[in-house]
Image (cartoon, rainbow, N blue to C red):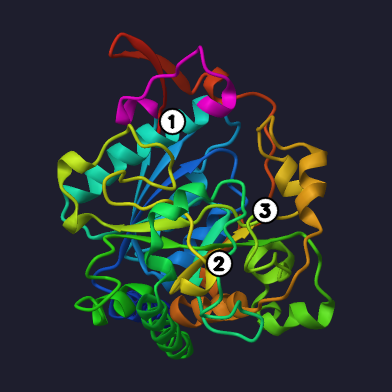
Amino acid sequence: MSGLCQVLLASYTVFILISALLIAEVASVLQNDIPSDGFSSCLVLKDDNDRLPEWLAYHWLVLPLKYLVIAIDPTGTTSPEKIIHDWNILDTGMEIVLWNDVDYNHSIDEDLDEKHQHRQRQKHFLAKCMMYHKVRNRSWVAIIDPDEFITYNTIVSDDPHPYRKRDPSGPFLQGFEEYPRFDETEYRNTMYVMREKAAESLGTSQTLFDFINEAKDIEPWISEVCHLMPRLFFSAVESHRHELIEAHVEQFGFDVMNFSTLRFFKHASKDGWDDNHFGKVIVDLSRIKSDQITKNMTTIHQPIPSACTYPFRPYETGIFRVNHYIGSWKAYSGKSDPRRTKERYEMFSSVNEGSDYQLQSWLGKFVEKIGVSNSKKLLKHSGLIDIGSVRLIDIDGYQRVETNEESAYYLGIN
């Protein structure tokens, strides 16, 4: 063998060894940093591909999200397959399963309008999805939407007083009268202490799953197998440039304008009903019996009718809260939904009763955890609006199938 060939062979061997070491190192970092257990979730998607990457990355980091079932609404115009593919090829420790109508035996009731067809799909899917997680011995499942982000409800200066007298005048709060516990002084004391601990956990980046498990033998976790979280609505009021750069992610090549949690900080009044509405829940399926899981739920805010209370709680009694983002008009109008009118958007988009920057640091922590390259791969579709021209239900990829003698639709997913 000539000297040149020997040099080339040696160089190639060194290259292969270095590459193998780098791959092994990345895999080792991921594996050593991935929690062994965490939250499950059930998510219905209808043209929310712009939100999904941010939602996945954030909850993978914060909950942590370990098991996710996504149901694709076939009346939408986009599919999340490419986004899910990015997560599946990188070993993040999160299991993502995609379902179509036929996977949970759902059929479309043609007698319902589009809004109620969607709500019916949500209820049927949630029941099947919760059962799917339960038979696999999973515990806490988060029931939220793609525009919602769970966080600690830390105590700050503009919070309602922890012992205030509640105003029951909201138009949908009559049912709340049946659940006086949230108004009891002892309960409010417990929640205040928990919120103080939540602030400490936020500072140490402790996951919500670990936070719950550390206190699982005390209230509220002993009795609240369906734990209600208040929602806080975030409007589309734009922030100043000096506020946006505090995320410190442009150094990694990210544009904060593609992330709702890093772009919008103005929120509704914390003690208001008109913008925040009902709360959302996390459910401990390990303490729920199978026969308690039913598609005959009144609303997705009470997914376990026998365990979930009326879905409103005063903001100051929440250990966790759910940030709810309306997003930009481009994102809002890009979703195939007849309810999303310009008038409705303008009604809510200018709300400005306070500012909250609690979620601003999450992306930097995400990059620290899995690296710049992996972060860019997983978030490359974030904020990108893909507006289709036809419904998925009408394209060749969907097949009409029969289930329970009614029609359902199926998207072939490789």
- How dense is the environment of label 2, judged by Cα within 10 Å: few (below 14), some, or many (20 and up)? few
Q: Residue at x 65, y 78 (%)?
A: 357
Q: Is residue 71 left or right of residue 67?
A: right
Decide which of 244, 387 is in the foreground and name it.
Answer: 244
Marks 2 and 1: which is nearer the front? 2
Give the SS element for disc 2: loop
Q: Residue at x 51, y 48 (%)?
A: 174
Type of amino acid at the residue the image marks with label 3:
Asp
- How dense is the environment of label 1, judged by Cα within 10 Å: few (below 14), some, or many (20 and up)? many
Type of amino acid at the residue the image marks with label 1:
Arg
Decide which of 288, 107 is in the foreground and name it.
Answer: 288
Q: Quadrant of residue 34?
A: bottom left
> How many circles with numbers are drawn on the protein?
3
- Residue 143 placement (x, y as % from top left): 41, 52
Q: Which residue is mark 1?
A: 121
Give the SS element for disc 3: loop
Marks 1 and 3: which is nearer the front? 3
Q: Residue 365 magenta-drawn?
A: no
Q: Which residue is mark 2?
A: 166
- Residue 14 placement (x, y as % from top left): 37, 82
Q: Which residue is mark 3?
A: 274
Which mark is on residue 7?
A: none
Q: Earlier along the polypeptide chain: callout 2 or callout 1?
A: 1
Q: Residue at x 40, y 36 (%)?
A: 298
How far is disc 1 from disc 3 in space, using C-alphas?
A: 26 Å
How far is disc 2 from disc 1 in space, using C-alphas?
A: 35 Å
- Residue 338 placement (x, y as % from top left): 69, 29
Marks 2 and 3: which is nearer the front? 2
Q: Is residue 59 above or below residue 309?
A: below
Rendered-image quadrant of the C terminus: top left
